[in-house]
Image (cartoon, rainbow, N blue to C red):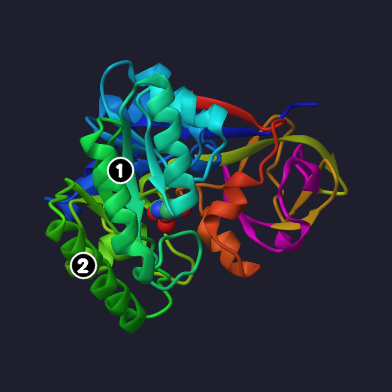
Amino acid sequence: MSRPVLEISTARFAANIRAVQERIAPSALMVVLKDDAYGHGLGWAVEAARDAGVQWYGSYDVASGIEARRVLGDTGRILAWVTSTDAEIDEALRARVDLGVGSAEYLRRIIARARHLERRARVHLKIDTGLHRNGLLPSEWESVLVEVRAAESAGELALVGIWSHLAEASDAEDDEAQRLFLEAVRVAGQTGATPDALHLTASAASWWRPELRGSVSRIGAFCYGVRSAEGPELDGIEPVARLGADVVDIVDGDAVIGIGAFDGIPSSLAGCRVGTPDGPRELRRIDATTSVVAGWTGAAVGDRVWVFGPGDQGEDSATTLAERIDTVGEEILTRLTSRVRRVVTP
Ligand SMILES: *Cc1c(COP(=O)(O)O)cnc(C)c1O
């Protein structure tokens, strides 16, 4: 049976990157690559972003950072921010992957590995500004900076960034988080540390709250054309990927398509709108490996149906689908299994 296809447009990705860059300038775009570039494929995303002139890459973990480094060669800056093992730290140091650091314990391990390998670790220190999810507490910030400055003097470390992550629950909370963030930057400055990369905001805040942007903005969702759930459409941003499946059978006048829950489509999406060559139709049922499109009399075996996409044939977007089941567009994309063929188009 024909496999479903995730068709990925390089041109749309590049156009989204341009739109984001124009919106956030002079803040620099860090393209976030976690979860295999939000299900689009990390290698493709790095190559396309590099060709679009992107300098910064947020890989989440070290292994993905190494993969990005393989594509980028000597160019580009890569940040892996998840706390990693000593073996991973070694790999990051060898591949010149910057490390995000949210605890004193992790900092000390990095310094020890840098000393051992005689390589200077490039570190972005994370201050906890209220999310309580990995980050140095304001109360320990100063003492950790003393260790950082000592390691800098010893040639083991370079403090290249300070960062935090916003809850994006309310503007007031984000304002308070920024206040704590700027205070941390100020305290660092008093010790003589003046890292270039100050970053606080992800997609939504980078787009809508210019006053919160730092010198770098870490952006995933909007680059891939995934708008915020319950959020407005975005000027110049369009979904990069469309999910298609072919008609494999016609049963009692209904079209059966070759995609189902086992491919990662939540069966609770039944009732959504899909795109057919004859316009939008209802996806009536989602079974294990197939689904049923209702009310489409002109269907023929082999016709392509778009389950989600940029809406060219009236289909919903990943985010519109996500909103039906109270989740986010990223989840719809990243749940797709490896049975879904990734096909890159120019
Ligand atoms: C995922 C992530 C981002 C990107 O978030 P988007 O909303 O997809 O832009 C930025 N920073 C951190 C720390 C993240 O985990």
**Residue nearer the viewer, 338 or 181:** 181
Could you tell me if residue 107 is visible in this image? Answer: yes
| Side of 53 where 123 appears, left or right | right
- Vertical position of residue 173 compared to residue 115: above or below: below
Identify residue type, mark 2.
Leu
Residue 337, by quadrant, is top right
Q: Position of residue 203 (x, y in %)?
A: 35, 57
Q: Secondary structure at mark 1?
A: strand
The amino acid at mark 1 is Met
Q: Which quadrant: the C terminus?
A: top left
The mark tally for this picture is: 2
Q: Which element carries disc 2, helix, strand or loop?
A: helix
Q: Are marks 2 and 1 in contact (CB under 8 Å)?
A: no
Query: In front here: 88 or 51?
Result: 88
- The residue singled out by tag 1 in the image is 30
- Name the one closer to the observer, 39 or 289: 39
Can you tell me whether the CB of the residue at mark 1 lies under 8 Å from the nearest atom of ligand 1? yes
Q: Which mark is residue 182?
A: 2
Task: State which region is magenta.
Answer: 254-282
